[in-house]
Amino acid sequence: MKISLASDHGAYELKERLKAHMAEQGHEVLDQGTYGPESCDYPDFGRAAARLVSDGTCDRGVVLCTTGIGMSMVANKVEGVRCALCHEPLSAEMTRRHNDANVLAMGAGMVGPELARRILDVFLTTPFDGGRHQRRVDKMMEEER
């Protein structure tokens, strides 16, 4: 699977750990930054990662900041992105099954590295259930007028 990845400075260390984990599993990771622990603006990196999912370059995306809130807000502004903020594996499973989420947001200050890895693994391996959920996803993705 091809995965777009981004973080801000608050989640840089977690991003690097998850990038290595995904590579070990055979995923192709496109790292959109940040590339060090220096202070930066999360929208620049979150938007870049979400755009790679939106345009079909990547199958899924992962965006990280201290809480995950800012990155999830940024990612969800990109057309075609359904970003879910998850702090435990069940939410990651259900957002894939029912919402067909294509971007995962997590907060490095909310989850430790081991829990983040478990959440990520569930997100990457859980299929979309389709069926009645497709109708709901279609409604969710309709533009407001």
Image: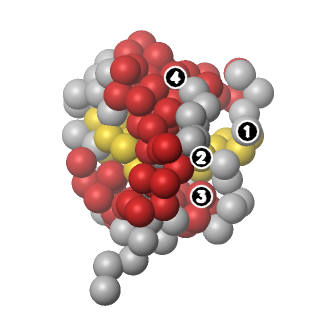
Q: Residue at x 24, y 48 (%)?
A: 69
Q: Residue at x 57, y 27 (%)?
A: 126
Quadrant housing the C terminus: bottom left
Relative image position of residue 96 (x, y in whole percent):
49, 36
What is the residue that sits farthest to the top in this orientation?
114
* Pointers 4 and 3 in contact (C-beta within 8 Å): no
Q: Which residue matches tag 1?
A: 1
**Amino acid at pointer 2:** Arg
Q: Secondary structure at mark 1?
A: loop
Left or right of 145 on screen, residue 119:
right
Graded by Cα atoms within 10 Å as few (under 14), some (14 to 19) or many (20 or more), the crowding at tag 4 reads some
**Amino acid at pointer 3:** Val
Q: Residue at x 37, y 21 (%)?
A: 90
Question: Can you see residue 52?
Answer: yes
Q: Which residue matches tag 2?
A: 60
Whole-angstrom CA distance, mark 4 to mark 3, is 18 Å
Whole-angstrom CA distance, mark 2 to mark 3, is 6 Å
Q: Which residue matches tag 4?
A: 122
Query: Residue 111 or 137: which is nearer the viewer?
Result: 137
User: Quarter of the image holding residue 116?
Assistant: top left
Whole-angstrom CA distance, mark 2 to mark 4, is 13 Å
**Of callouts 2 and 3, which one flags the residue occurring earlier in the amino acid sequence?**
3
Q: Residue at x 42, y 71 (%)?
A: 142
Quadrant housing the N terminus: top right
Q: Secondary structure at mark 4?
A: helix
Whole-angstrom CA distance, mark 1 to mark 4, is 14 Å
* Pointers 2 and 3 in contact (C-beta within 8 Å): yes
Relative image position of residue 141 (x, y in whole percent):
44, 65
**Amino acid at pointer 1:** Met
* Pointers 2 and 4 in contact (C-beta within 8 Å): no
Q: Secondary structure at mark 2?
A: strand
Q: Which residue matches tag 3?
A: 53
